Amino acid sequence: MGLSKNARTAIGFVIALIVALTAATVVALILVVSPTSSAPTHAAAARVSRCFASQLTVAPGPGSGAAGSVGQVVHFTNHSHSSCTLSGYPGMQMLGSAGKPLATEVHRGSSVTVPALAVRLVTLRPAGKASFNLGYADATGYGNERCPTSTRVEITAPNDYKPLTIVWRIQPYGGDIPHLECGEITVSPVFAGAGS
């Protein structure tokens, strides 16, 4: 038994309506998606790259002492004309008077004089600062045993490979009383600003 003329007309109307709605939906999606799809290109262009050694200077800030340990804050300054980012832990290497490396072991984390900090992305605008804390044991309790004192220190920004060398005399001790280990330094991740 065939469909009546009214039924066929109704079905035709429904099909036409579905086609029209589908077409409108596709056009709307194109209009909405197109601008969004070009957004990553603009975002990528605006993304700030990491800081390189050529953009930075480094200098020790205020120091302090507590419970046989020395604490120090160290500042990176962006001297370039472009913003850049730092994230993570710096590297360090002590140097002797002849420029040769001295025993240096850098520990990432916290200690008596290094507060626990989370790793964060820090953006340095031109002339902006980021800092990190470092700490190490002094000579307390080691009697006549002595660790070498640096004349210069190489400091490498997080995720970089080229160190910045500064004149800096530090004398880190470490290990324990029976087993002295020289050059042990704890560092925090970098944080925004100059710290205290």
Image (cartoon, rainbow, N blue to C red):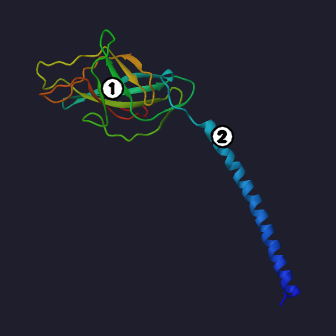
Q: Nearer the viewer, residue 187 or 175?
A: 175
For residue 114, the mark is: none
Residue at image position (15%, 27%) is 179
Which residue lies at the image location 27% right of the left edge and 33% below the top edge?
Answer: 113
Residue 170 appears left or right of 4: left
Residue most extreme to the bottom = 1
Give the distance between the C-alpha atoms of the residues marked 2 and 1, in whole angstroms: 41 Å
Residue denoted by label 1 = 62
Question: Would you say 42 lies left or right of 178 here?
Answer: right
- Residue positioned 42% across, 21% down in the render: 163
Q: Position of residue 20 (x, y in %)?
A: 81, 67
| Residue found at the far right of this picture | 5
Amino acid type, mark 2:
His
Q: Which residue is mark 2?
A: 42
Q: Is 3 rendered above or below residue 60?
A: below
Amino acid at the residue labelled 1: Pro
Quadrant placement of the C terminus:
top left
Residue 104 position (above or below residue 87): above
